[in-house]
Image (cartoon, rainbow, N blue to C red):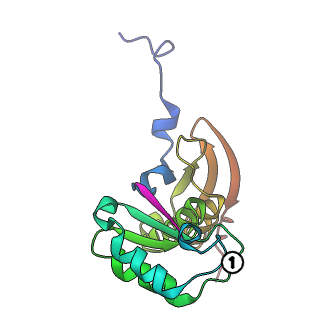
Amino acid sequence: MENTQNKLVNRVAESGLITLNLEDYFPDTTFAHFDIKDYLFMELILKEKDFREAMKQYDWASLEGKTLLLYCSNDAIIPTWAYMLVTTNAQAYVNDIFQGSEQEYYRYKMKKIIEDIDFSKFDKKRIVVKGCGKKPVPVAAYIEITRGLKPYAQSIMYGEPCSTVQIFKRPREINKPE
């Protein structure tokens, strides 16, 4: 006869909780930085002829397979066409081009990835959005996942299945007599 008092039961596994780890959706990319400041006269003025020549001389193949972060770290006025010119030269080599910082890229990309999730598969489910990971998942991603889940999920929690913070719980439907 089996001793049921000493049997270990994994209550988390039996709880029906679905854990969503936003790190699973995190973009896997290597960045290349392109600071237009490096191509300005005295780091302030864009000279069209010099800039065009520098773009012809640049080793675009060194960006192969990377995400190009395009920006100007100086407080200079950069004409829009300069960003467009860099893009036309880099596009054949890079996986993606983004105007901004790594943090801005992650925020933008995570939003797009989360928007593509079919949230209806979480209908009436109890969801734990995993926190505390190794990747720099932006707070904006947690906002977007919550917005997407709320119309469907029975409940949304944050943390680990063994220790969560309640975020949202759908009220129980009361059966009304007819």
- Work out whether 35 lies above or below 78: above
Q: Is residue 57 magenta?
A: no
Q: Which image quarter holds the N terminus?
A: top left
Q: Residue 163: which quarter of the image? A: top right
Is residue 139 or residue 116 the one in the foreground? 139
Residue drawn 36% across the image and 68% down it: 58
Give the amino acid type for the residue marked by disc 1 in the picture: Ala
Residue drawn 67% across the image and 83% down it: 77
- Work out whether 71 lies above or below 2: below
Provide residue 72's location: percent of width, then percent of height.
Answer: 61, 71
Provide residue 25's location: percent of width, then percent of height.
Answer: 44, 57
Please report the bounds of the magenta region as a residue range.
30-35
Is residue 105 or residue 1 the one in the foreground? 105
Is residue 159 or residue 48 the one in the foreground? 48
Provide residue 131's location: percent of width, then percent of height.
Answer: 60, 45
Residue drawn 51% across the image and 36% down it: 12
- Work out whether 134 lies above or below 150: above
- Work out whether 32 lies above or below 2: below
Q: Residue 38: which quarter of the image? A: bottom right
SS of the residue at dot 1? loop
Is residue 143 or residue 111 the one in the foreground? 111
Q: Is residue 33 magenta?
A: yes
Q: From the image, tell me which residue sits under label 1.
A: 76
| Most frequent secondary structure within the magenta stretch | strand
- Kindly tell me whether residue 20 is visible in this rendering: no
Callout 1 environment at 10 Å: few (<14), some (14 to 19), or many (20+)?
some
- Kindly tell me whether residue 151 is visible in this rendering: yes
